[in-house]
Amino acid sequence: MTWDLAGQLFASQLSLWWIIWPGILIGIVVGFLPGFNAENTLIMLLPLTLAMPVDHAFAFMTSLYCATHLGGGIPAILVRIPGTPGAAATTLDGYPLTQQGRGQFALTLSFVGSVFSGLVACIVTVAMLPWLSVMGLYLRSVEMVVVMLFGLTLIAVIAAKDVLKGLIAGLFGLMIGMIGADHIYNTPRGTFGFLELYDGVPLVPALIGLFAVSEALMMVERRLIAGAGPGGAKQHDWSQTFEAIRYSATHWWQIVWTGLVGLVIGIVPGAGASIASFVAYQQSRMWSKHPERYGTGEPDGVIAAEGGNNGVCSGTLVPMMALGVPGGSTAAVMMIVLQYHGMVMGPQLFTDNPQLAYGVFFGMLLSYAFMILTIVPLARYMSRIVLIETTYMVPLIILVTVVAAFSERQYMFDMGVAIVFGIIGYIANKTQYHVAAILIGVILGPIFEKYLVRALRLSEGDPSILFSSTIGNVLWALLVLSLLFPAWRGWRRRRKEAFA
Amino acid sequence: MSEARKAYGADLVIPVMGAAFTLYFLHTISGLEWEAKANGIFVGVALLALVAIQVTRTVIGIARGRGDLSFEPLLEPREALPKRLAMLAITIAFVLAVPWLGLGLGLFVAMAAGFGVLGVRPWRRAIFTAFIVAAVATVMFNAVLDTGLPKGPVEKLIERVAR
């Protein structure tokens, strides 16, 4: 791609500002609401996008998609309810910051981290598209099993205070994630006789229960969400916003590499933002000088989770555009719109229609630029939500999110699922079994099983196939390293302290 | 209870739930082909082993006098417990009643009851806030997002008037 073409694309995408901005606003609202995501919103808006010219439709869809990833972090930070599964890792440090009266700081960190990691991922995608596009081809079921196990190891690391409890929570989540018909014979397993569970445990009600309902039940014992932190919950000025911008600027490397982690994981079909954000969070914690601060309101934890979450956006589009294989369900909806307009996805898209192929990523760049201008000034006002007394917040959160649990599949049953997970989440919270570990298990359960069974079928049940590929073996080594490295660092730290 | 004493009973609730579910799951896959049960056995056995370790840890802890089998952390603080249980009951009643009352009326009643139970006073304020929330939620979920939530007397009346 030449600089001339880049200039032309930038100018043409800039002229679409009037369609990018509504996309951003809708995306932020949709991301904020648990139960709604870019995929179901784009489906609802199909009559609109199908009627638009293709470049307009794509600019609208990508801006909405990127903004949902950013919007999901807002309730995750303020009330510990991730708006999207990808924002679950943001709760780990975002919410403790809010409880310390630093909600404005956490929100601004999240916005700056999201936007700049998204920008970095976008620029790298444009620069390296030919190479990135074939990356997905090297990851087969064997490598995917290891990628999934990589996600699972996070369970132990996230719950570092008590690894046994973390593992029990994670494996309990995995067992729950296995509920439903198996992938080969379609026989129901562990469904308690409920037809509604044949497709597996619905993710949105599980997320709402584990985070929203359980947290609201915990809130009953407090008058306000925010405590009296150093900034104080009632701070009215912009100081926390500027502090967060300064912090992000001095920790730019954190934003860059977590965005790249998100990009790489986004390219892997089926992995998605939830895994990306947890992997980025775990890696950030592993390499940090202060891993013990993670989970207690560490700003780098917020940046890492949001960086991974937003880096995914560009990555998801790569296999769709370069190979014609959608990297996720949202990309699949976008592909429907493009095919309706007669676009043929695949390598020839970049030679036949470079304006559209590369223009998408320039549109994303502009979306991120507009996003930061729109959202950062609002952090100060959004953070006031924690000043509402819990006597109002508790019924509001429980009842409205339980209603939202209905929206994914439109089953009344799912509202009950949210309540059951709410009770499990409450018990887990009170006894320090990490709800995030349960959620990771529920998310990874069905995906892990799909790839494991596929790999085992290829080898006719021989498990040695899991160690048969070079890439897979490199991934195994990295997995072992990420398990051993924190233990080694902890041992070194204890040794130093003993000698001090 | 002294600060050092642990409530092992509460700590065992999640492991016991996990173990019970695992045993049930293993029972449901007992007659299936290996592809349908490989993952369940792999994860289930690992979970049961971890639960056994947790139970052993509990037994050792109790034997050494570090704690007891109480469930105190789940119930504390005691003064919040009735409110918590009432809120849970209201939510369950709301889910059961929505098919008949519809979203608007159901949410209004449940929200007002929730505000009342948690101590929002005067009642006029609780009812007014509940009305606003229910109205906004009805417009958002039914009119804007068309989520297909059950329609009750209020929604049917609005539809009739709109026609």
Image: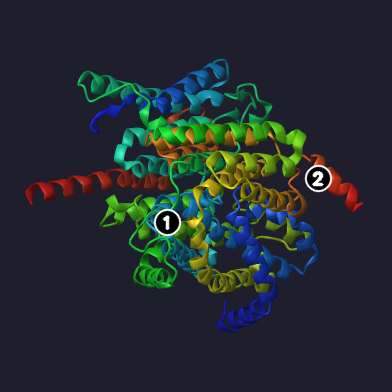
A280 vs A434: above or below: below
The picture places residue A271, in percent across and down from the top left corner, at: 52, 48
The picture places residue A455, in percent across and down from the top left corner, at: 51, 35
Q: Amino acid at mark 1?
A: Thr
The picture places residue A205, in percent across and down from the top left corner, at: 59, 39
Q: Residue most toward the left?
A: A499
Residue highlighted by disc 2: B155
Q: Residue most toward the front?
A: B122
A444 vs B145: above or below: above
Residue at 55% from the left image edge and 31% from the top image edge: A420
Residue A232 versus residue A127: which sits nearer the camera? A232
Q: Secondary structure at mark 1?
A: helix
Residue at 65% from the left image edge and 42% from the top image edge: A403
Q: Amino acid at mark 2?
A: Glu
Same-subunit check for callouts 1 and 2: no
| Residue B94 located left or right of residue A380 | right
Instruction: Give residue A98's mark.
Output: 1
Q: Chain of mark 2?
A: B
Tell me how far mark 1 sits from mark 2, CA to CA. Answer: 38 Å
Residue A186 versus residue A473: which sits nearer the camera? A186
Residue A405 versus residue B135: which sits nearer the camera? B135
Q: Chain of mark 1?
A: A
